[in-house]
Amino acid sequence: MKKIQIAVDGPASSGKSTVAKIVAQDLGLIYLDTGAMYRVATAVALQNNLTGTSDDVAQIIKMIQRNPISFQNTKKGQLVFLGMNDVTKLIRSNEVTNNVSRISAIPEIREFLVAEQQRISAEGGIIMDGRDIGTVVLPEADLKIFLVASVDERAERRYKENIEKGIPTDLAQLKTEIAARDYKDSTRKNSPLKQADDALLLDSTGKTVADVVNFIEEKAKKLI
């Protein structure tokens, strides 16, 4: 069986992580949540009042090097750790969400985390989701998917997720924040959100998770 690399890109709350985790489980692939890695870097910056100056960036990277990011799969889902600390809930807070585009756009942060992602994925048998996987992190991926959905539907999805996790959220404000993040992600200078030339475009508006999973798995099985 061929160990393939699958890249799933798309804007915030388009369903990338949800479907990537299911595909990973169904096909026996490793799932690497790149978005969580950038959220961890953002949380580190916020908790230590690091605003993004050159010295601040160096400190963020050193803190993560001393306390590596890792993932743990459980029956309740994937947990994210910074060293020995479980930061799964922390990195999904509204404060982190509203600042992650800014921190993830810093070239040194992206370079550091991209190198980590490439190291982990080098042997194949992996599915990775983010915003620049097919264009920057895994440009030679065997299968590339660009997953999109309307702002309204993405806001509804994130709203339900936050409420289930006990995170107070205003739906109207969430729509505004998602639209603003789309603009930031697609217009940033370094590794902007965009569809790779060889990626398959999939609009998940009105589609179920199963619909999207089946589409990706059908394409992947032909390669495996």
Image: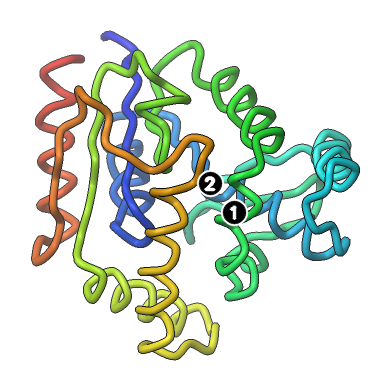
Mark 2 near mark 1, Cβ–Cβ under 8 Å? yes
* Residue 223 horizontal side relative to residue 60, left or right: left
Figure check: 81 above or below 163 = above
Q: Position of residue 203 (x, y in %)?
A: 13, 52
For numbered disc 2, what is the local secondary structure? Answer: strand
Q: Name the quadrant containing residue 21.
A: top left
- In this orientation, which residue lies closer to the viewer: 138 or 81? 138
Q: Which residue is mark 2?
A: 73
Say which mark, if any, is on residue 19.
Answer: none
Q: Name the quadrant containing residue 108.
A: top right
Q: Which residue is mark 1?
A: 79
**Rendered residue at 32%/39% (across/down):** 194
* Residue 172 horizontal side relative to residue 33, left or right: left
Figure check: 85 above or below 66 = below
Which quarter of the image is occupied by the C terminus?
top left
Q: In whole angstroms, how far apart are the C-alphas of marks 2 and 1?
A: 6 Å
